[in-house]
Amino acid sequence: MHILVTGGNGFIGSHLTERLLDAGHEVSIVDDLSTGQKTNLDGVLSNPRLKVIHADLGDADLVKQVCQDVDVVYHLAAAVGVALIAKQPIQTIHRNIYPTQLLLEELRRLHLAGKKVSMFLASTSEVYGKNPKSVWTENDDLVFGATTKPRWSYGASKAIDEFLALACVRECNMNIVIGRFFNVVGPRQSGAYGMVLPRFISAAIAGKPLIVHDDGKQERCFAHVSDVVGAVVSLMNTPSCFGKIYNIGADQPVSILEMAQRVIAIVNPKCTIEFQSYSQAYDDDFEDIRRRVPDLTRLRQAIGYHATQSLDDIIRDVWRASRA
Ligand SMILES: NC(=O)c1ccc[n+]([C@@H]2O[C@H](COP(=O)([O-])OP(=O)(O)OC[C@H]3O[C@@H](n4cnc5c(N)ncnc54)[C@H](O)[C@@H]3O)[C@@H](O)[C@H]2O)c1
């Protein structure tokens, strides 16, 4: 198949591109390198089945051109990362809605002309906002904070993408799968935009204190990117999954403080932990989510998903990759 991966120079997109090339597909990627790195695709650049286009997907002509003879689109391009979102809300909203709208419009046009192109839409656990339930299932309410707090623009913009995609399913029966990623981690993830594990690993390698925000009791579930990419590809290879939303990630919560302690134990036992308030880390407007745990029942039933890597495996893998 000929597959388009948007955001292919990004963290998850580069792993997905490698997986699809390994499976024998022809892969085109589009990435404007806004947060992605050219080097993320170094391992596959010489593959003759890979085509790399460095351009902004907010261009209708480009979108038309890159969708021309593809069978599947994996749409991962977005503005990602809590720090980036807090600092650049205009860019977040624009990048997360407009390219998705252009892609869906073009795929709908092709669909109405008789060519079915299936699409995976990368969404996020942030769409649940601050829903107080202890475990989130796909039909739960979206509970965002006030619009005066830019952080919620990320989840709200991804929710608009979901509404648009589901409208295409409902009105035109298009083959679309929506995946809500929970915390995805692994080699190549950048710590520059607020992602916690790469920040901790770099600090531990440098022998610096690990900076934990607030009291560190926030709970998250961390999944290795290879498990996540495997789930994404399986969903797209299972036609009964079209038209549905799936939580994707791990479901074993760990507090951020506990994760910092595990990083220290594995990478550099001499390191210490320092606490920083949200206002020091971001700004006075910042509001966080205390607990974020997915219900993975739907994903398990659809594709028999199970995570293969523990948090310690993941920490060791990211550490190994950071030293390479
Ligand atoms: N990493 C996570 O834990 C996580 C969690 C939830 C959701 N997601 C979603 O997964 C997807 C991939 O995230 P990631 O962690 O790999 O982030 P990333 O920043 O590494 O990847 C995003 C890529 O998209 C590119 N991009 C952004 N806007 C673009 C545009 N207009 N045109 C072309 N390229 C553009 C960036 O340059 C980057 O390479 C995103 O849609 C994100 O919202 C990720």
Image (cartoon, rainbow, N blue to C red):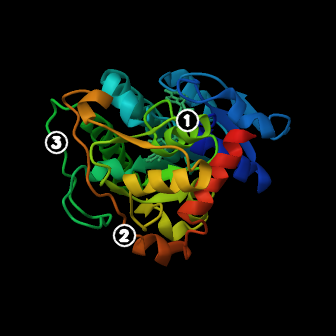
- Circle 2 sits in a helix, a strand or a loop, which is it? loop
Residue visible at 68% across and 27% down? 38
Residue at the image point whose x is 56% and y is 41% from the top: 204
Q: Does residue 5 appear in this view? A: yes
Pick the front one: 35 or 113: 35
Q: Residues within 10 Å of mark 2 (few under 14, many from 20)?
A: some
**Dot 1 beta carbon under 8 Å from ligand 1:** yes
Residue located 42% across and 60% down the image: 221
The spot of residue 136 in percent (x, y) is 30, 64
Please say if 198 is above or below 308: above
Secondary structure found at label 1: loop
Query: Mark 1 sits on what residue?
Result: 190
Kind of residue sitting beneath label 2: Asp
Question: Which of the labelled discs sits on residue 145, or is there none?
Answer: 3
Q: What number is the disc on residue 295?
A: 2
Nearer-N-terminus badge (1/2)? 1
Relative to 195, is 17 on the left or the right? right
- Position of 161 with respect to 146 (left or right) is right
Give the farthest residue toward the front. Answer: 270
Q: CA distance from mark 3 to mark 2?
A: 22 Å
* Residue plotted at (69% across, 35% down): 40
Foreground mark, 1 or 2?
Answer: 1
Residue 293 drawn at (x, y percent): 35, 63
> Image quadrant for the C terminus?
top right
Task: Report the amino acid beneath label 1.
Answer: Ser
Closer to viewer: mark 3 or mark 1: 1
Q: Say whether residue 188 is left or right of residue 157.
A: right
Element type at mark 3: loop
Is 55 placed above or below 312 here? Answer: above
Q: Is residue 71 visible?
A: no
Whole-Å distance between the Cαs marked 1 and 2? 27 Å
User: Observer-nearest residue: 40 or 198?
Assistant: 198
